[in-house]
Image (spheres, grey):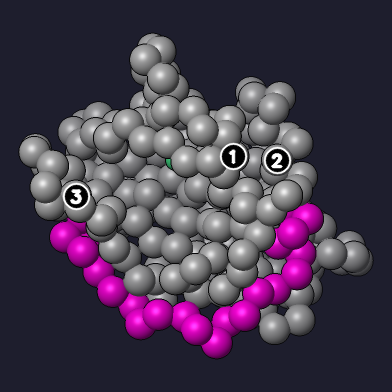
């Protein structure tokens, strides 16, 4: 479903409020409505997650406060696709039937998707198994994204069924807003299923991974790059 922007903004639970981008109904200066709606739906999905890790609130507050200011939209890459993008319609359809704020986030993501430059992780062709052709990532904000900025990186992870994203780690603290079924793991701990609408929090530097089951996995991730 293509989002009617004017209707979607008017129908927002926070429409009519004033103040920053993500607590109000108007885009930050220089930000288009598709990006505005996507961020607003992400924030609503985060707030609607009743079982989110307590530690996620602190970094999320920093992330969404920073995102109230638009970055530079002049360097957006050309849209691009990789093989796993074939699973995006199914993932969005699953998300559209999800709970709470997830269907609205799926609509906002669908409206944004034609502009995304999907890519594969560097070196993935060297890994055995279905990972190379079975995963896709896209940057919404940050280097290589639709909006250039150096304080927050926002992106998407999409995986075909039965694909495991390898263990990895990075200094920035991370949160995921999960749109579909799929499992996450930290260090060598047990795999757990946040479920659609669930939140994953990765402290700085922790080894983590994710994997899909019988259906595609789709999630939005946020990396805090600031102090
Ligand atoms: Fe990560």
Magenta stretch in the rendered image: 64-86
Q: Main secondary structure of the magenta part?
A: loop
Residue assigned mark 3 = 124
Residue at left offset 55%, top offset 57%? 153
Q: Which element type, helix, strand or loop, lies under badge 2?
A: helix
**Residue 43, horizontal then vertical, whole percent:** 68, 50
14 sits left or right of 217 in the view:
right
- Quadrant for residue 56, please give it: top right
Q: Which element type, helix, strand or loop, lies under badge 3?
A: helix
Marked residue nearer the N-terminal end (1 or 2): 2
* Nearer the observer, 81 or 72: 72
Number of marks in the rendered image: 3
Residue at left offset 13%, top offset 42%? 127
Question: Looking at the image, is 189 positioned above or below residue 131?
Answer: above
Residue assigned mark 1 = 173
Residue assigned mark 2 = 59
Q: Residues within 10 Å of mark 1 (few under 14, many from 20)?
A: many
* Nearer the observer, 71 or 92: 71
Residue at left offset 49%, top offset 28%? 206
**Residue 104, horizontal then vertical, whole percent:** 56, 54
* Nearer the observer, 78 or 5: 78
Tell me if label 2 and label 3 are in contact, CB under 8 Å: no
Question: Looking at the image, is 62 positioned above or below residue 196?
Answer: below
46 sits left or right of 190 in the view:
right
Tell me if label 1 and label 2 are in contact, CB under 8 Å: yes
């Amino acid at each position: 479903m293509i989002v009617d922007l004017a209707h979607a903004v008017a129908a927002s639970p926070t429409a009519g409020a004033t103040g920053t981008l993500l607590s109000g109904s108007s885009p930050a200066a220089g930000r288009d409505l598709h990006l505005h709606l996507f961020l607003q739906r992400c924030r609503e999905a985060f707030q609607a997650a009743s079982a989110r890790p307590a530690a996620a609130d602190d970094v999320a507050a920093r992330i969404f406060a920073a995102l109230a200011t638009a970055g530079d939209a002049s360097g957006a890459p050309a849209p691009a696709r990789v093989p796993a993008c074939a699973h995006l319609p199914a993932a969005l359809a699953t998300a559209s039937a999800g709970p709470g704020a997830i269907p609205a986030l799926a609509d906002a993501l669908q409206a944004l998707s034609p502009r995304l430059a999907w890519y594969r992780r560097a070196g993935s062709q060297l890994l055995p198994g279905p990972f190379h052709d079975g995963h896709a990532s896209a940057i919404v904000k940050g280097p290589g994204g639709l909006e250039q900025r150096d304080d927050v990186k926002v992106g998407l992870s999409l995986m075909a069924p039965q694909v495991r994203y390898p263990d990895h780690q990075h200094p920035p603290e991370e949160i995921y807003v999960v749109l579909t079924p799929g499992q996450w793991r930290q260090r060598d701990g047990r795999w757990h299923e946040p479920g659609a609408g669930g939140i994953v929090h990765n402290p700085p530097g922790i080894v983590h991974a994710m994997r899909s089951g019988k259906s595609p996995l789709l999630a939005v991730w946020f990396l805090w790059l600031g102090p």
